[in-house]
Image (cartoon, rainbow, N blue to C red):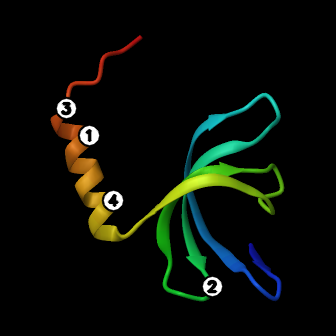
Amino acid sequence: MAFSDSDFSFEIVETLGTLSTSKAGWNTDLKLVSWGGRPPKYDIRSWSPDAKKMGKGITLSTEELIALKNLLASIEIPEN
């Protein structure tokens, strides 16, 4: 899915997975997204059900995603 206007464009290359879904139907997803026609990066943020609107999030390069994966694997996360 791609979106473009005169000031802003993005293309969702691939949805890799959903972390959570809000009562309003917005998903917090890990996606591969091309912002402004640049090479795609990994992106974690909330998206509207039609994926035309998004909330605040974080964009990671491949190296940053690998570092995050290694960091998460190395720490103990308490389960609720």
Look at label 4 and name its amino acid: Leu
Q: Is mark 2 on a helix, strand or loop?
A: loop
- Is label 4 or label 2 in front? 2
Q: Where 73 falls versus 33 (above or below)? A: above
Label 4 – label 2 distance at C-alpha: 20 Å
How packed mark 1 is, by other alpha carbons closer than 10 Å (few <14, some 14-19, many 20 or more), is few
- Is label 1 or label 2 in front? 2
Q: Earlier in the sequence, mark 3 or mark 2?
A: 2
Q: Earlier in the sequence, mark 1 or mark 2?
A: 2
How packed mark 3 is, by other alpha carbons closer than 10 Å (few <14, some 14-19, many 20 or more), is few
Q: What element carries label 3?
A: loop
Which residue is disc 3 drawn over?
Answer: 75
Q: Which of marks 1 and 4 is nearer the N terminus?
A: 4
Which residue is disc 1 drawn over?
Answer: 72
Which residue is disc 4 drawn over?
Answer: 65
Q: What element carries label 1?
A: helix
